[in-house]
Image: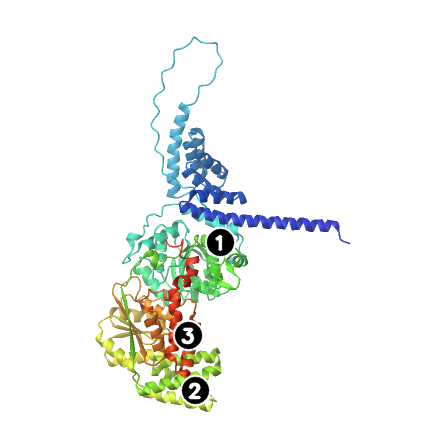
Amino acid sequence: MHDPRKQERRRRLLKERRAAELRENDQEEAKYLLLLAGRSYRAGDVDSALKSAKKALHLDPDLYAALDLLAEICFRNGQYEEAVAYLSRLRERPDFPSTNFNLALAHLKLGRKREALKSFQDFLDTTASLRGAHYKRMRESAKTYCVDLAKETAQSSPPPVVKEAPAPKAPPPPPPPPAPPPKPEPPRVLVDFLPAPPPAFDRQAGATVADYLLRRRLLELRLAQNFEDLICLPSLHGVDTYVYQQETVRRVLRHYKGRALLADETGLGKTIEACLVLKEYWARGMVRKALVLTPPSLVSQWKGELVEKFGLAPVSPEDFGFRSNPAQFWQSEPLVVASIALARMEPHASTLAEVPWDLVIVDEAHCLKNRTSSNWKLVNSLQKKFILMLTATPVENNLVELYNLITVLKPGLLATETEFRKLFILPGKPKSPRNPERLRELLTEVMVRNTRSAVDVRLPHRIAASVVVPPSPAEAELYQVVSDYVARRYREAKGGTAGFTLHQLQRQAGSSAHALGRAVGRALAADKRPNPQDLRDLERMQELAAQVSWTGKSRQLASMLSERQAKTVVFTEFAPTLEHLAEVCEDHSLRYAMFSGDMSKAAKDAAIARFRDEADVLLSTGAGGEGRNLQFANTVINFDLPWNPMRLEQRVGRVHRIGQTQEVFVFNFCQADTVEEQLLRLLHDKINMFELVVGEVDAILGTLDEGDFAELVLDLWLSARDSGRIDEAFDELADRLLEAKKQYSEAKQLDETLFQRDFEV
């Protein structure tokens, strides 16, 4: 038999739970309406702003930011009675310190001098301890008003009433003196706008919401000053800052309070923007302890920028003193540039988490997209007043990556991960946003994404040419043997590790006989029991590769480098090819430097310095295309072609980027009758990839990720060889890419939906 009391208790709890859910829904809806109201108001649509803000306040009467916005709209719109009503409800809120000042102005507009005087006095009492030029100016203005209003109200006070015998009728009093001219209205003071507290968030992201809001409010009070003038600009050395970069810095300082995601397109100068923020804070005395976390290959570049252009004195763990006492180094040095790969290791990570940092900068912040990674855990654990995260690709595979980034910046802005998935991700479509308008409004609180189309940055012209070299008989036979071997083994392997190895082998054949011969030698040494057919094929490859000491591409490269009088970067994917290219330069007495991913940091720095100051040629593997700025060169030669167009674009983008003042030439080498020739015909002749602005090719190939495109190319090559339809097969792929180019606006729908509106400065 059921206990009636238990049943009643269940009903009551269920009712309370439903009521709480309704309240939470109303609060969420109110926040969304408030964001819409703010956007409408900024766009000049006052009626829509009022309507949305009033709805928000109706749904959540405690949403004080709605009162704040309504008061400002009504004041500017001349509705002073309504402004007084809203401001009066905010008077006791410590997080809106300007309320009494604005209330006094509204009373003045209505002719209520006594009420205005009292509000000015209340403002002086409640803001006496607040710092900043903004509040100082307001207090000075309020004091002046108080003096004038006290005199005016004293003069207009009626005399005390005294009951006496009636006196003889006196003559009428003289007319009052003319009123003093009205005091000029002070500069308009905008009503403070502090967003409502964020919704509940994943506790793994940091401290409590109350702690976070308290720290944020203290920072807002300290930052309540004029960042219109960037006082650091006169102290910079050799930095030509663009207007959009300066406006980005102002937005980060004034609106984002030093916590921002800088997501400009590649090549627009995110590093300069971050350094400007650091320098401005440093000049104002607001940052005295800063940490810059970068990929290992970029540590020295960041240090060089900060020293040479911004007049700062960073240190890094590579400097003297780190190894003897790492903990002391982290704790005592004011400005540190470090590899995130080192910082995330113990005991460094634990020490870094104990240091109170004023500012943390994370370059290539897409390394934080996975909240289970050691990178994310490190940055999230740091004590940081300000944080800047730099990445050109906030979303690559899943919108949850964006959630993980924003959670480090502003905990709770996007709710919990479960709520984020529910509110903003379409089931089964991890890149497709649900409620994109609402998500965009939330992201405007932390993110800047400047695009080339918006900032109108003009780069010098870029000219690309294909250099297709006929093979010698030995080269042609070698490539034929490799392709036959790869085709036979590829059908058997069906992907996996073996598939990847075959893929590499085909690419090495397109690079050089040296790269192929080295790979075949390793394969023969590793396979203790090869089958007879594999053994015959591999030995024949090794024999032919040994015969091809100099390829047609090598001779063509030597001729071009000898004739051209220009700083030239020659890219290859493979170290054996790099060694061969060094021999080519030696044989032709060409001054060159070498750069590869397996070099030490010091050797890499020395190679770049030699290329800049002495050498004419930089021979580089793909590592040279990652983060190194080579604008002092104006020629790129791709000796071989990566099958991923994004990597090819990154190579060119090291030279063709902001700061380049010369016309840029791109020469793409390939051997005739190879995969690379078909790939070049596809990218250059069909979709004009090398005529596009760096960064646009990913929009055209947006539906194909790196693996898909590379696998597609290899599948086409191997299958078409059997049927003798190579040109036709690649023409069909070209048609697909042309269609993708034609539908460019659809291909960039995700960026447009999430980032391309409301994020440019």
The answer to whether residue 744 is above or below residue 683 is above
User: Which one is in front, 715 or 136?
Assistant: 715
Q: Residue at x 37, y 36 (%)?
A: 141
Display colour scheme: rainbow
Label 1 belongs to which residue? 413
Quadrant of image for the N terminus: bottom right
The answer to whether residue 174 is above or below residue 133 is above
Which amino acid type is marked by label 2? Ala
**Residue 445 percent location from the top left of the image:** 44, 52
**Residue 216 percent location from the top left of the image:** 46, 50
Separation of marks 3 and 1 at Cα, in angstroms: 38 Å
- Disc sitting over residue 710 in the figure: 3
**Mark 3: which secondary structure?**
helix
The answer to whether residue 43 is above or below residue 657 is above
Residue sitting farthest toward the right: 1
Label 2 belongs to which residue? 525
Q: Are marks 3 and 1 in contact (CB under 8 Å)?
A: no
Separation of marks 2 and 1 at Cα, in angstroms: 56 Å
Q: Is residue 65 visible?
A: no
Tell me the mark number nearer the camera, choosing from 2 and 1.
Answer: 1
Which amino acid type is marked by label 1? Leu
- The quadrant in which residue 630 appears is bottom left
- The quadrant in which residue 367 appears is bottom left
In primary-sequence order, the first of circles 2 and 1 is 1
Which amino acid type is marked by label 3? Ala
In primary-sequence order, the first of circles 3 and 1 is 1
Tell me the mark number nearer the camera, choosing from 3 and 1.
Answer: 3
Q: Are marks 3 and 2 in contact (CB under 8 Å)?
A: no
Q: Residue at x 27, y 73 (%)?
A: 617
Separation of marks 3 and 2 at Cα, in angstroms: 28 Å
Residue sitting farthest toward the top: 168
